[in-house]
């Protein structure tokens, strides 16, 4: 029996996934939660074989959740099920340690098959996305990504500096580097481009 925990912030999607998986004789849905922090608590409490999670969720993201599981060396495999058909997201997911990456518009039976593959120790990645993921590398480092994300969300360089314990000049340098690497003319365009590619 494959023991599964679902983490998905949209109630209708969460309910549909749970109902579909419960039809499978070899899959048991232990629980379902709506945000990353709740998922982290349930992962520790229920000790599922596989976590099925979205990327964007309230609290911590699906990728941050997978990274936390890896850091704590918990024997839980992870599958991302998302609408984000962007190569950058897949690359970051693989770097975080996920074993599966499926799109929400894929046929429903694909998820059950992916769970079986991942539970056996394999990987299950959307094939078209896998091809695209290696065509263009993410040029941003972690700090540039963090600063650009905060700038794109409307925070000033002064606010970002205070939040990250950096000098105002250092923040401006990170933004300038990110803008240059992306070939953008300003921080808003850089943010938009990076979001489009799945690098934020």
Image (spheres, rainbow, N blue to C red):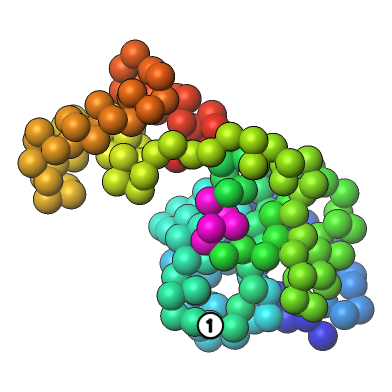
Picture residue at 35% right of the left edge, 48% below the top: 142
The quarter of the displayed image where residue 54 is located:
bottom right
Q: Answer above or below: position of 14 versus 138.
A: below
The quarter of the displayed image where residue 1 is located:
bottom right
Q: Position of residue 34 (x, y in %)?
A: 55, 60
Q: Position of residue 68 (x, y in %)?
A: 44, 70
The quarter of the displayed image where residue 157 is located:
top left
For this rendering, which residue is in front, 172 or 57? Answer: 172
Picture residue at 64% right of the left edge, 42% below the top: 134
Q: Position of residue 121 (x, y in %)?
A: 75, 76
The residue stretch that appears in magenta: 92-96
| Residue 55 appears in the figure | no
Q: How would you rate the neighbour count of disc 1 (Cα within 10 Å): few for under 14, some for 14-19, many for 20 or more?
A: some
Q: Main secondary structure of the magenta part?
A: helix
Q: Answer above or below: position of 62 versus 89.
A: below
Q: Position of residue 36 (x, y in %)?
A: 48, 62
Q: Is residue 36 magenta?
A: no
Q: Secondary structure at mark 1?
A: loop
Residue identifier under label 1? 74
For this rendering, which residue is in front, 63 or 12? Answer: 63
């Amino acid at each position: 029996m494959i023991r599964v925990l679902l983490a998905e912030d949209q109630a209708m999607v969460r309910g549909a996934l749970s109902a579909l998986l419960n039809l499978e004789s070899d899959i048991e849905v232990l629980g379902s939660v709506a945000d990353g922090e709740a998922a982290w608590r349930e992962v520790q409490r229920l000790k599922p074989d596989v976590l099925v999670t979205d990327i964007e969720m309230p609290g911590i993201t699906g990728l941050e959740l997978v990274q936390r599981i890896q850091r704590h060396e918990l024997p839980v495999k992870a599958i991302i099920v998302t609408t984000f058909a962007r190569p950058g997201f897949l690359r970051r997911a693989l770097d975080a340690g996920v074993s599966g990456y499926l799109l929400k518009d894929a046929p429903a039976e694909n998820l059950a098959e992916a769970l079986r593959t991942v539970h056996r120790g394999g990987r299950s990645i959307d094939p078209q996305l896998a091809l695209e993921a290696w065509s263009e590398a993410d040029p941003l480092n972690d700090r540039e990504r963090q600063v650009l994300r905060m700038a794109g969300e409307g925070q000033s360089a002064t606010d970002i500096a205070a939040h990250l314990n950096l000098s105002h000049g250092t923040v401006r340098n990170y933004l300038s580097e990110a803008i240059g690497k992306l070939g953008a003319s300003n921080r808003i365009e850089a943010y938009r481009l990076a979001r489009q590619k799945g690098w934020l």
